Structure formats: C-alpha cells, structure tokens
Image (cartoon, rainbow, N blue to C red):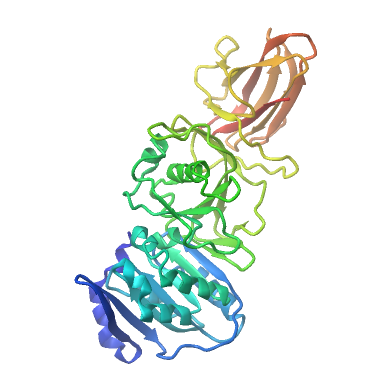
Amino acid sequence: MSPSRNPIRKRLAVLVTTTTLLTVAPIGVTAAYAQVTRVRQGSSTDVSRASWSGPAYTMNGSGGIVAATMNQAIAAIRGGSGSIDVAVVAGSGTGTPECDVITGLSGVNSCTTLTLTAASDGNNSQVNTDIRNAEFVYFAGGDQCRYVAWKGTALEASVESVVAKGGGVGGGSAGHHVNSDIVYDACGGSATSAIALDDPYDASMTFTTGMFRWPNYADTINDSHFVTRDRMGRLMAFVARSIKDGRTSGGKAWGVGVEEGASLFIDRTGLATLSGPSAYVVLGDHQPEVASSGQPLTYSNFKIWKLTSGQSYHFGNRPTCGYYLKSVTSGVPSGSLYSGTPVTDCSTPPPTGGSSYAEVEANDSRTAANDVTGRSYPLTITGDMKSGTDRDYFAVSLASGQTLSVNCAVPTAYDADLYLLSSTGSTLTRSVNDGAGTDESASTTRTASGSATYYVELEAYSGSGSADYSCTVTKS
C-alpha cells in the first residue's frame, strides 16, 4: 500500500491554486460504487511526434516518484529534444502525488492521473486514449491485485503501445510488482518471508503471468519495500515457485527486490542502474530440492547480486559472476541473506544444483565434525568463525579416483585458512592466503582403492565474527 495516495487536503489545495492547469472530470460510471477520475496537470494539448528514443523504465521500491531515475527516463525518451506526456495509473486514492512531482521536472508537457476503481475500467475509452497519447506510464502504489485485474483489457495493449513507440513505463510498490514478467499479485493476502519459506504454496502465494513482458526483462519477478520489510526470504520463495510451476521460459527466474526510496532506471539495452539505498537481484537456476504444498522450502545456491547507489546490473546481458551464494534448508536460510562474499572469478562456471549445509556447533574437532557425506554435490557449506581460535570440521567421503575440491569465500571480518585432512588427521593440502577476506581453495585426489573419510577444516587465523564464510565443495 502507498499511504501517499490519499492526501485529500493536498488535492483540494491543488484544485484551488492551479485551476487554469487542471482538468478534473469523472469519465464514466462503471458500477454503482465506482467511477474513473481523471486529473490533468500541465498543458491541455498532447505532444505530437513521429518517433521517440526509448524504451526506458523505472522500478521503484516504494510508491513515490524518485526524481533521479524519472529524469533519466524522460531524457532517454526525449532523445535530447522536445517534451513528453505522462499518464499515472492508480487503483485507489484521491490525490495526485506522482504528477505533483513529475510536472516539476524538465521535459514534461503534461501529467494525467487516472484513478480506476473497477476491472472494467481497463476498457474505458478516455483512459486508453490518455495512455496511448502518453510517452510514459507510471503505475502508482496501492494494490497490485487490482492492477492484474486489467489483464486482457484494452489498457494492457495501450500500455504496451507506449513502450513499442519508444516511450516508457514504470511503477512503485504495487506498481513495481505489476511491471515484472511474473507478478506476485497478493490476491490471497500479503505473504511474509516466514510464511513463504515455511510453505511456498501458502494461500497468500498467488501469481499472475502473461500481462506485461518488457524487452530484456523476461523471467523476472519484482518485490518492493525490500530490506525494510525483510522480504528476501519471500522473494526466494517467489523464484523457487516460478521455476517449479513452469512460469519461466528457460527454467531460471530472476527476483528483483528494490528497497524503499530506491529506484532502478533501465535503459533500452536492459542496463539497470540504481539510485537510492539498495536493490537485489536473486537468481534461481535449477529446480528446488523441495517445494511442495505444506512443506518448508529447500533450495541450494541462490545467486544474489547486491546493488548500492550508482551500481548496475545488465538485464540485457545477464552476468555470470559477482553474486554471493545463499541457500534455504527446510525453510531456514543459511545466515544473513542481505550480504555475502561475491564470486569474482568469471572464468569458473557458477555451481548449479547440489545442496547446502549450515554448520552446527560444536564442530571444533575431527571427532565432532559435521557429517556431510550423504549430501548431494556440489555442496555449499556456510558457517562462521565465532572466535579467534575457532575451528570448523566437516566429514566427507571419497571413492577411489575421486577428487575433492573446496573453494571458500571468506568475509572481510576475519582471516581463515583451509585444510584438507586424511581420515587420521594428517594434512594432505592446505590454503593459507594472508589477509582478512582473502578466499581459500584446495583439492586432493584419492589414489588408494576403496573409499575413505576425509575432513574439510576451516581454521581462524586472525579475527572473528558472525559473517558467514561460504565453501563450495565438489567431488569429481
């Protein structure tokens, strides 16, 4: 919901002080309780121009306009000259907070707020004329379940025509949700991360597909108010559900979570650049290990890109490194989900499938080692160095001819060393790179016949903390 969409006093003030610039009119009663309201600010005449330089998009974590990205979108569409008309589409409220900001920006000819209160309003002729004559359409905050009700109406095609002519589209909060390929519609209520991870098929986990599919933005599912409302867990569940239910075109799904006050500007090539606090792109690239009604989610190796202001993610040429890894096992995430050590080696293919394991203390010796012999591989092990003398042991099994490889991403809070040990505790190989946050990797091959137990040991060299290390363990 966007509380700024109900400023009645502000609306009255606008009507009194700028009556020469506004046209306010109900444009068709669609039910006994419903009518469309149209409020136009700026010029009463639409711009006429043969071609535009977009498309361009803004994806906002909360309902309001973010001037920085809106200015970028306007400039991209204008292509250096002229001005544009903007249409704001809302499903509730009585104010014009979005147009109040937009009309103050350079390059804007007019801004029209269209408040639609019934599904059939998507076929209103004046609404569709205003949208088709606009060069940018912004979906306000509110309730995305109302917005997906316009799927299949004339409004859907009208918005698509704006993008097709080189204009743009955007939205905030609910309006951000509706602009992804797969829409979390919240028609069954709003899911929390705890609910979604405990049961990804909870009644509140409902989706709409086939409404909008913007160029370079396929297989995405958006989320808003991201860090403030702790929505990483539910976005992971959205991604897992999208893959499990076959809602994506290639067995992969990208979640796009934008924090309150933040906004992604996406240009015509698909390059997204962040303005504001943070945004996250969450990739699921394999089927979930467990995603069934009534059961907690298990999903290994979500790949997560964290963006801060000024950083970019290219949806037109999606990256294969720069992510950090997080997993969910029986509904329980592996440590803090909002930070991790990025994988920076683009020459090594990212792991797919496998499983994950979060260390269980006390595992400070070989006899107390966490047994991960029965896990599927590649295996992602996460844990932390709780003290400057901490040691974490994990037992694995190797058959004759198998090679054990371990690559550990170490957080900047401490310096940890990696050892691979024989069944008797002898050091077979080690990686002891210097410096906090320095990654470690090692491998060993079993040449003897039969199988035997080996140990992976992480040992604190200096420093400690609750930040997770993440070790990818493979057997080949």
Residue 125: % across, % down: 37, 80
Query: Number of marks in the image?
Result: 0
Q: Is residue 156 left or right of residue 407?
A: left
Q: Residue furthest front?
A: 152
> Considering the image in quadrants, where does the C terminus appear?
top right
> Considering the image in quadrants, where does the N terminus appear?
bottom left
Q: Is residue 91 left or right of residue 179?
A: left
Q: Is residue 189 above or below residue 333?
A: below
Q: Is residue 301 above or below residue 53?
A: above
Q: Residue at x 39, y 77 (%)?
A: 99
Q: Is residue 222 left or right of residue 150?
A: right
In the image shown, does 188 or 267 lie closer to the viewer? 188
Whether residue 284 appears in this view of the structure is yes
Q: Residue at x 37, y 81 (%)?
A: 126
Q: Residue furthest left?
A: 32
Q: Residue furthest right?
A: 447
Would you identify the image quadrant in which residue 441 lies?
A: top right
Whether residue 381 appears in this view of the structure is no
Residue 218: % across, % down: 57, 57
Residue 270: % across, % down: 61, 63
Q: Is residue 127 above or below residue 417?
A: below
Q: Residue at x 53, y 44 (%)?
A: 243
Residue 151: % across, % down: 41, 63
